[in-house]
Amino acid sequence: MAQQDWAAIEEAARAEGQVVIYSVSSRMENIVQDFKDKYGVDIVWYDMESSDQVEKFRREYAAGVSEVDVLYGNHEPDLVGEFLPAGMVEAFVPSTSAPFLDPNEMEPFLVQRWSSRVLIYNAALNPDGPPINSLWDLTQPEWKGMVLAPDPLSS
């Protein structure tokens, strides 16, 4: 990976005056003042679900509006399947971080965190093992109303 000219990147950000971020995390608020103090650049951020980010970005792009600088969310299918191939977005990995990352943490986009999903079942009620073989089993009618999970259409 080529070294990036951080002085030029910082100067371009100062010339633009702000960095616009669409984020699924309200914790973004914690970095706003420190970022401005360090770089002299405002962060304008929108706390929104991934599905809202995707829709907002898609509409802005179609209208020729280039507002957002960073998409921070959980919308990999749209990014990888639509936005990246169409040239609507590009991956950015800081050259200062790259030496500490495995290739699979940088492609097709920088992994900002790993998360896991865990299914738990009551072994006392299921002494012969798990009552399902895959997540798809939970889509069967006999499981209706018996599974507690976040809405997969939101983040």
Image (tube, helix red, strand yellow):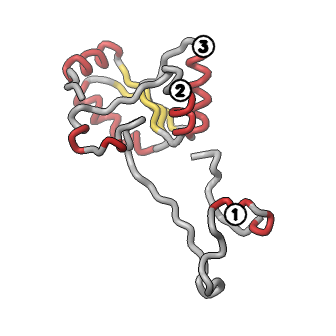
* Residue 146 left/right relative to 129: right
- Identified at 61% across, 45% down, the residue is 154
Please state which of the two labelled residues, at mark 3 or mark 2, is closer to the viewer: 2
Residues 44 and 92: in front is: 92
Please state which of the two labelled residues, at mark 3 or mark 1, is closer to the viewer: 1
Q: Is residue 62 above or below residue 26?
A: above
Q: Secondary structure at mark 1?
A: helix
Q: Quadrant of residue 40?
A: top left
* Residue 94 left/right relative to 79: left
Check the image and name the residue furthest to the right. Answer: 141
The x and y percentages for residue 23 are 47, 37
- Identified at 35% across, 14% down, the residue is 16
Q: Is residue 76 above or below residue 37?
A: below
Dot 1 or dot 2, earlier in sequence: 2
> Within 10 angstroms of label 3, few (less than 14), some, or many (20 or more) residues?
few
Q: Which amino acid lies under the numbered mark 2 shown in the image of this protein?
A: Phe
Q: Quadrant of residue 13?
A: top left
Q: Which residue is mark 3?
A: 63
Q: Is residue 22 above or below residue 62?
A: below
The x and y percentages for residue 152 are 63, 50
Disc number at residue 27? none
Q: Which residue is mark 1?
A: 138
Q: Which residue is mark 2?
A: 83
The x and y percentages for residue 149 are 63, 60
* Residue 77 left/right relative to 33: right
Q: Which amino acid lies under the numbered mark 3 shown in the image of this protein?
A: Ala
- Identified at 53% across, 21% down, the residue is 86
Q: Secondary structure at mark 3?
A: loop
* Figure quadrant of the N terminus: top left
> Within 10 angstroms of label 2, few (less than 14), some, or many (20 or more) residues?
some
Q: Secondary structure at mark 2?
A: helix
